[in-house]
Image (tube, helix red, strand yellow):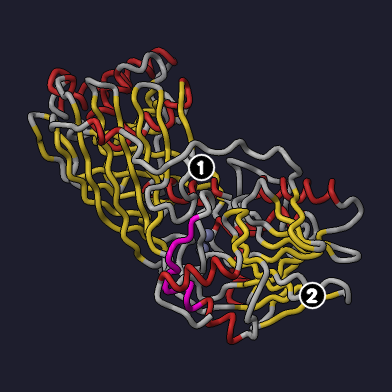
Amino acid sequence: MKTVLLVLLLSLPFVVPAHERAAEPAAAGSTLASYQQARAVLARAIEVAGGEAAIRRLRNVSLGYTGHRNMINQSRRAFPPWDREPASGSVVVDLEGERMFADNYTSYPGIGRFGGAWALKGDRGVHWEPDRNHHGSEIMMNFSGKDADGPWAFIPRWIPPLMLVDAWDGGTNLRSLGRAVRNGKPMHALVWTQRDGATITMLFDTASGAFSGYESIHDDGVYGDVINCIEYSGWRAIDGVYFPTRRTDWFNDEIARDLELRYRVDAALADSQFELPSGYAQPKETETGERLREIGDGVYLDTHMGGIMIVEFDDFLAVVECPGNYSMSHSTIAAVREAFPGKPVRYVVPSHTHGDHGGGARAYFHAGATLVTTPGHVEFYRRLARVSRTISPDPYDATKTSPSIETFRDKWVISDGSQTMVLYDIGPNAHSEELTMVHLPRQGIVWQADVYFSPGTGGGVNPAMPIGIDFAKKLKSLGIDDFQALLEAHNTRIVTMEEFRRALALAGFRGY
Ligand SMILES: [Zn+2]
Ligand SMILES: [Zn+2]
């Protein structure tokens, strides 16, 4: 599930009101005519941006950005109005030396800042987590060869004049879609496939000829089909090349992020800007052991999916957490069916409504499981059951099988005499108004999501955040004075009570 949070951190949502989205059909009569029309639109935009010569003269470009993210499906409430949180980052490209650096951060309600950084020289590089609060001290990804296209594609997406010349240099993978209207303005729309394979729609103001932004589409586990739109504005010339001072990201009809952009060109660059900071290690060989790891009597973790917990009862199974989307959760269900033939998954218990915890619920509805949640989250899961998914269709159809949802307040016990699993609502807290935690009293296991984080690699202990201290107090008030293992939704690390106490003590709390 590392990937899940990573995707959330990196997916930088965007759009345009639906009523303004009606595009006229493409005007070009042939593929070649469509390409030629696109070239003409692009040539004009390059001229308006300062001209090809001025753009190609750039030796390096640095961008710093700050602003806010509207926390769509990552807020304390399951529905709008969303919480607003700070967002920031930077992008540096050394065009002469073929080097790049990027970092990107978002704060999440109650749990602070998370982010990632990338550094590449040519087609080699690394991706790591500067704050080490989630992944820890292992390098998250190494790039070589074609893998490097992914991070290199950030450069044109964040530096519009470079997108224009990149598209110009991109061979025949450019087409005109004809005229479109965005935010009430007539636009010319071009389709361009970038070096990492992503296809985007570039938009150009038909009046001025200027580039205004780009759109893409993706599937979201919670919302289904999504249009992302990035809108650049407030253009200013630096050394004869026009750069925007604002970027607005839309996610369907909502503003997802609003940023102020500060560009510099041809600055003096230090080698250290493109290097991995010290203290990071290469990832250990991934274990090839069994997918479901038994961590207590009848208790398993799905090691491919972070901290998904499976609890085995005499006649059925309960799965804690259904992150991501249909296919991720379906993969857990398939692994569980293989390991426990004939034992149905009777319950699925998502901790809360954030996509990295509940986005896969449809797979469980399809499998006939009952989703157990708190009253304030029922409508969220009902809507998720009805969402339309044409980009990534799945077999679940809520009109044929209505979702089975069971609710509880405060506490709910699932027991068959030999196995006992206790659910508690530990909300409201700084992260979510309602949040389900799981206690397995016989095994001494506490499972939680997003109230306490330990680095997934390196064995370190970070100071507990205020929400972690509140969680410790909550455990005490529930009579859970000790435990053998503390599990978390986002990785497979098992935290001991001693480590938990150390994290609390580092934050000055000694009451647990
Ligand atoms: Zn969350
Ligand atoms: Zn989370």
Relative to the observer, which residue lies in front, 15 or 488?
A: 488
Within the image, what quadrant is residue 480 found in? Answer: bottom right
Q: Residues within 10 Å of mark 1 (few under 14, many from 20)?
A: some
Position of 334 with respect to 101 (left or right) is right
Q: Is residue 408 above or below residue 299?
A: below
The residue singled out by tag 1 in the image is 218
Classify residue 396 as left or right of residue 472. right
The three-letter code of the residue at mark 1 reads: His
Q: Which residue is mark 2?
A: 414
Classify mark 2 as within 8 Å of ligand 1 or not, answering yes or no: no
Mark 2 packing: few (<14 Cα in 10 Å), some, or many (20+)? few
Q: At 34% across and 40% down in the image, what residue appears?
A: 277
Give the extent of the magenta segment: 460-470
Question: What residue is at 29 percent from the left and 22 percent from the top?
Answer: 98
Seen at 91% across and 64% down, the residue is 315
Question: Does mark 1's beta carbon lie closer than 8 Å to ligand 2?
Answer: no
Q: Amino acid at mark 2?
A: Ile
Above or below for 253 versus 277: below
Of 90 and 485, nearer the camera is: 485
Q: Is residue 331 magenta?
A: no
